[in-house]
Structure formats: C-alpha cells, structure tokens
Image (spheres, grey):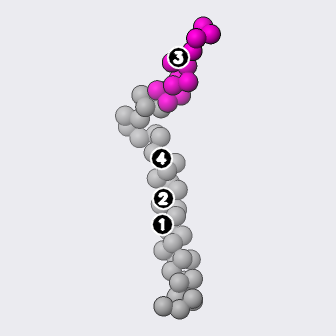
C-alpha cells in the first residue's frame, strides 16, 4: 500500500469514521437514562462537604 492509497483512505473513510465518532460522543450524554448519571456526576463534589 502506497502513501497515496493511505492518504485517499484517510481522506474518505477516515473522515467518515471520525465524523461518526464525533457525533456519537456528542450524543452520548443525551441518551435515554443518562439524566441520573449526569446529575450524580455534577453533584459528586458536594457529597462530603463539611462547610455546610
């Protein structure tokens, strides 16, 4: 496989794979059932707060 073949693959299928991965990572926090996990992660630092 030559450099030009690898470059063509990266420009076509590599770009498509990175786009799908990007969209998947953006959509991950908004999936069904993730609300409680996101709430727990956001409030984790306040669980053992002694200054209240």
Q: Mark 3 = which residue? A: 48
User: Mark 2 or mark 3, which is nearer to you?
Assistant: 3
Say which residue label 4 marks.
27
19 to 2, vertically: above or below: above
Residue 34 to residue 9: above or below: above
Q: Earlier in the sequence, mark 2 or mark 4?
A: 2
Q: Which mark is residue 21?
A: 2
Give the image location of residue 4, x and y in percent.
Answer: 57, 89
Determine if the magenta segment contains residue 42: yes
- Crowd tier of the residue under label 3, counting other residues whose Cα lies within 10 Å: few below 14, some 14–19, many 20 or above: few
Measured in 3D between alpha carbons, the distance from the residue under mark 3 to the one under mark 4, in whole angstroms, is 31 Å
Mark 1 nearby-residue class (10 Å; few <14, some 14–19, many ≥20): few
Q: Which residues are magenta?
A: 39-52
- State the separation of the CA atoms marked 2 and 1: 6 Å
Point 38% across, 37% down: residue: 32
**For residue 43: magenta?**
yes
Earlier residue among tags 3 and 1:
1
């Amino acid at each position: 496989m030559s450099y030009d073949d690898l470059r063509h693959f990266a420009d076509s299928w590599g770009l498509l794979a990175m786009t799908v991965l990007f969209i998947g990572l953006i959509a991950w926090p908004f999936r069904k059932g993730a609300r409680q996990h996101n709430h727990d992660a956001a409030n984790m630092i306040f669980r053992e707060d002694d200054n209240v």
